[in-house]
Image (tube, helix red, strand yellow):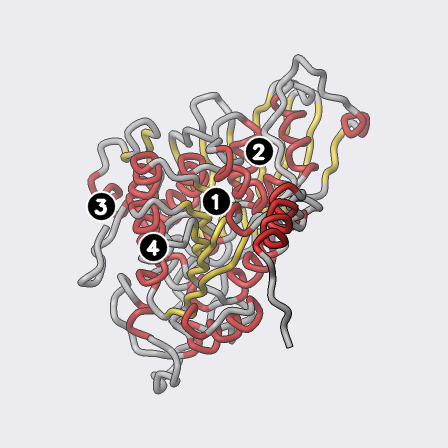
Amino acid sequence: MTRPVSRRHFLRTAAAVALAPTVIPSSALGLAGTVSPSNRIALGFIGVGGKGMHGMRNFAGCAEAQVVAVCDVDSGARENARKVAGLPPEACYNDYREVIARDDVDAVQVATPDHWHVLPAIAAARAGKHVYCEKPLSNTIAEGRALADAVERYGVVFQHGTQLRSLRNVRFACELVRNGRIGDLHTITIGSPPGLATGLHPEEPVPAGLDYDLWLGPAPYAPYTPWRVGRECGYAGWYFISDYSQSGWIAGFGVHDIDIAQWGMGAERTGPISVEGEGVFPEGGLFDTVMTYRLEFKYANGVTLLMTSTDLNPHGVRFDGTEGWVFTRGQIDAEPKSLLREVIAPDEVHLYESKLHEQNFLDGIKSRAATITPAEVAHRSTTPGLLGGICLRLGRRLEWDPAIERFVDDPEADRLRSYTMRAPWRL
């Protein structure tokens, strides 16, 4: 039985409660190494295959991040991501536009095939969502310019997936070059992995759970084969098919190394003025992008950038100057060895420091400061690889004007800065 409460007892108890301190768990306030739910950044993940899942896991390890949506045209990939993220079925999407339409999504990660980077990223920027986009930024030069302009126009924070910039040795190597420790820089040599060849593969039925038409998107229609969309060759096949990766592995993988090279020489917001080279292409078969190659870029500052496949040079970036050299790609080596013990003085050039690429993106969203790889830099790092692909496709030397981003008196080459998208898709 309950005992009746007198008015005097009720008022005395209420007053005591009002005067007592309110105890809120520190985790709810973002203390004790956590962030309160209201201060977390809600992220949607567009493309959750291998690279997309890796990025999602990295973001999930950041206190400020909250995974709220996953999207993929492959139902198996998105269901796996949903389970890993612990999301309900209604947070799982086939079409990226549904993720972008959610009011509670603050930012997106785009980790789709190369031909699907720019359209979702621009749509997200237009909707006021911040964008983390995997490399290479774009499939064509015109797409990259459109995306960089959209990021600027809509004022969103952008991060490019050239994660090597967030490694200490890479930054230190570039600081050695920028501060003249190797003397006058004259040559940069890049070794980057070659492309692949394969045979002809017959059309197969589209497997259940794959929205193949949406996978193709703006690319021309082509019959389905797992070699086109899967990893039968050890890598995703679309890396080596020009409909989805116009310059193949030169841009798809080499963008990491080009980004380092331009950072080290201080040319991350410009580009080369000419390119020439030669390459070996598959003789028939599904894959049609260059395998082994040698490209030579010239820059207005007098530096020559030599980019080859790794059959000619080791994987990484070597800066050669009049007084020594430094080599990096995560690791670091130099000659003389004393360079490795150098200390960059407070009044010298110190490059942007980031210790984790995903955390740097989240910090940029909170502070509205530029990330370590903003959209303009991403576009400029992607462009040389795309230029190289055009050069090899045409089989001749090309002159490039990085200020206006057009070839010099070369309408044929200019036409290859873009391509006609399959309806209804367009920039």
The quarter of the rendered structure image containing the N terminus is bottom right
Distance from disc 1 to disc 4, alpha carbons, whole Å, reads 14 Å
Q: Amino acid at mark 4?
A: Pro
At 78% from the left and 30% from the top, the residue drawn is: 340
Is the residue marked by circle 3 packed among few (<14), some (14-19), or many (20+) residues within 10 Å? few
Q: Position of residue 223 (x, y in %)?
A: 30, 78
Q: Closer to the camera: disc 1 or disc 4? A: 4
- SS type, badge 3: helix
The residue beneath circle 1 is 160
- SS type, badge 2: strand
Q: Amino acid at mark 3?
A: Arg
Q: Quadrant of residue 405?
A: top left
The residue beneath circle 3 is 415
- For marks 3 and 4 on the same chain, the one whose residue lies earlier in the sequence: 4
- For marks 2 and 3 on the same chain, the one whose residue lies earlier in the sequence: 2
Q: Residue furthest left?
A: 423
Q: Closer to the camera: disc 3 or disc 4? A: 4
